[in-house]
Amino acid sequence: MDLSSQRQYIQRAINVKYAFTATTQQTIYTAPTGDDFDFAIIKSFLACDHGNQQTDINVSITDTGSNEFFIYKEKNISAHETIELQTNEGITIQQGEIVKAQVSHANIHLVLSIIEYARGD
């Protein structure tokens, strides 16, 4: 099979880290936009309660039309617990989409491992 005519993608792996200092909804990650950018995949999404109080977390994706879609709503995290919110093969984020989160107590750290894909041809 001749692959010379197949679209090639360039990958970039990043970690996004966020420490909540307030309980208001925060933007955690915005997928890049541009002529060459296509999508990103969240491969891992960890939430750690580093305080001594259980916390609820809401996580959503806002599309380019400003529509908000919840991934988790009031997901409970016990005191001093770390949970993996990402449990399947990954969540695909299209260019310009925004991952947002909100917590009920400001004692949460989030770490997302993301692979961004851009056209390389």
Image (cartoon, rainbow, N blue to C red):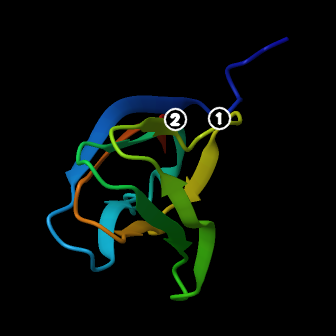
Please give the label number shown on residue 33: none
Can you say whether 114 is above or below 54 in the image? above
Q: Where's residue 105, x and y in %?
A: 29, 66
Q: Residue at x 56, y 60 (%)?
A: 75
Helix, strand or loop for disc 1 = loop
Disc 2 packing (10 Å; few <14; some 14–19; many ≥20): few
Which residue occupies the extreme bottom position in the image?
Answer: 66
Examine the rendered structure and indicate whether residue 113 appears above or below residue 25.
Answer: above
Quadrant housing residue 34 = bottom left
Residue 119 seen in the current view: no
List the residue tagged with mark 2: 121
Query: Residue at 44% across / 68% down in the picture?
Result: 96
The kind of residue tagged 2 is: Asp
The label number, if any, that marks residue 7 in the structure image: 1
Which sits earlier in the primary sequence, circle 1 or circle 2? 1
Residue at position x 55%, y 77% from top? 63
Query: Which of the 4 image quadrants contains residue 71?
Result: bottom right
User: Relative to residue 80, is residue 77 drawn left or right?
Assistant: right
Q: Residues within 10 Å of mark 1 (few under 14, many from 20)?
A: few
Amino acid bearing label 1: Arg
Q: Position of residue 16 (x, y in %)?
A: 29, 44
SS under mark 2: loop
Q: Are marks 1 and 2 in contact (CB under 8 Å)?
A: yes
The picture places residue 79, in percent across and down from the top left corner, at: 36, 46
Q: Relative to the observer, which residue lies in front, 121 or 11?
A: 11
